Amino acid sequence: MFERLFKLKEHGTTVRTEVIAGVTTFLTMSYIIFVNPDILSTTGMDRNAIFVATCLAAALGSAVMAPGMGLNAFFAFTVVAALGFTWQQALGAVFISGIIFLFLTVTGVRSWLIAGIPHSLRSAIATGIGLFLGIIALKNAGIVVDNPATLVGLGDLKQTGPLLAILGFFVIAVLDALNVRGSILIGILVVTVLSMFLGVSEFQGIVSAPPSIAPTFLQLDIMGALHGGLVHVILVFVLVEVFDATGTLIGVAKRAKLVEEGKPSRLGRALLADSSAIVAGSLMGTSSTTAYVESASGVQAGGRTGLTALTISVLFLAALFISPLAAAVPSYATAPALLYVAGLMMRELTEIEWDDLTEAAPAALTAIAMPFTYSIANGLAFGFVSYVVLKVCTGKWNVIHPATQLVAALFIVRFAFFAE
């Protein structure tokens, strides 16, 4: 049956290899079932319902489209916390962005946008999101605190939370350096268990029936998302979804040798599934879903077919029964995971063309503005607008792709006519 469904021999793999690859990928990315509820619950959303939505979204999206780390932070800390929109409106914005994303994919506009955005800016977006996650992680851990004199300062490192967060980071980093699968998940669990032993976190059990998804299911406010102030939010969702998901899918597919020059590929199907999963996720009550770069771990373990994805999907459904453990995970336990992922995203800095200032300066502005204005949207705006201005003023206007011009113009309109 598996051979008929997944053509295992054609891809040079076996059932055993595919299942092992699926388990490996699940262990690598399963930290999202703890981190995503922790982030999105800051908006007032029900933590248990988000946990269920996260597991279901990951399973439904063929296991590779779990809620994205950058976009859940944008959803919670920019759209809801900073801009003041309700989480229902934010879910509505995710839904609309998913519909737009689906349209862009079907019509081929997505490919046009990808081809038109400068490589340096793409790398800067990933770097900036990493920096943004970094400052959120340090804040959640109590390592970085508010300081009226300098805006930010160092927290009290003698407190239990910061100390456990630092320990968690080292556990994750050391295990990952030793190629231990599931290092991020292990780090989260180590800190959570220690906090229980120290009495700062309450043990509520491990297994129970899945909690209700009702508090977030179909709670999106689509009409509220059409509010003028959310136009640029939808734009950011679409832009990040386009670049992050597409780049990840292509990168992982190439590593698996599923995309080869001169040969037909099924990348189009993956892009369509990716787009559809965003719409489904918003209906269940989670931020934008995306292809996960952690999927590369499964490829490294030999995964080549849908059987790997099916294995991951089953494991995410099984994870629905560990909600008490998920509820007991404190924010300083997920902070090390956020910080470590942030560090991994910083690798994109090497892809920026530093020798060309008209490429380097906009890229740097993009990355710097995201954490310092506490907004991914502002970082994208600074980057695209400055890129067009610098290219035009240095006589290089002819290298600006129409897609970049369009995005820059949209951001200028946003600042000129739409208040925060």
Image: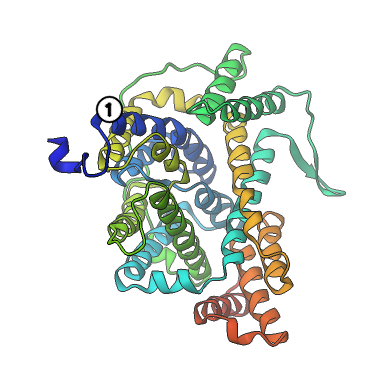
Determine the residue positioned at 66% across, 69% down: 382
Quick one: SS at disc 1?
A: helix
| Frontmost residue, 196 versus 382 | 382
Determine the residue positioned at 50% across, 40% down: 41
Residue 404, position as x, y percentages in the image: 54, 76
Determine the residue positioned at 34% across, 42% down: 63
Amino acid on which the number 1 mark rests in the picture: Arg
Residue 388, position as x, y percentages in the image: 64, 79
Vertical relation: 184 (above or below) 63: above
Q: Residue furthest right?
A: 149
| Left-right relation of 413 to 15 | right
Q: Which residue is mark 1?
A: 16
Residue 31, position as x, y percentages in the image: 48, 33
| Left-right relation of 21 to 120 | left
Give the image's coloring scheme. rainbow
Mark 1 surroundings within 10 Å by alpha-carbon count, few (fewer than 14), some (14 through 19), many (20 or more) = few
In the rendered image, which quarter contains the N terminus? top left
In which quadrant of the rendered view does residue 355 lie?
Answer: bottom right
Q: Residue furthest top?
A: 197
In the rendered image, which quarter contains the C terminus? bottom right
Total marks in image: 1
Vertical relation: 366 (above or below) 346: below
Vertical relation: 389 (above or below) 241: below
Residue 288 showing in the rendered view: no
| Frontmost residue, 384 versus 414 | 384
In which quadrant of the rendered view does residue 56 lie?
Answer: top left
Residue 202 showing in the rendered view: yes
| Frontmost residue, 140 versus 247 | 247
Residue 38, position as x, y percentages in the image: 52, 37
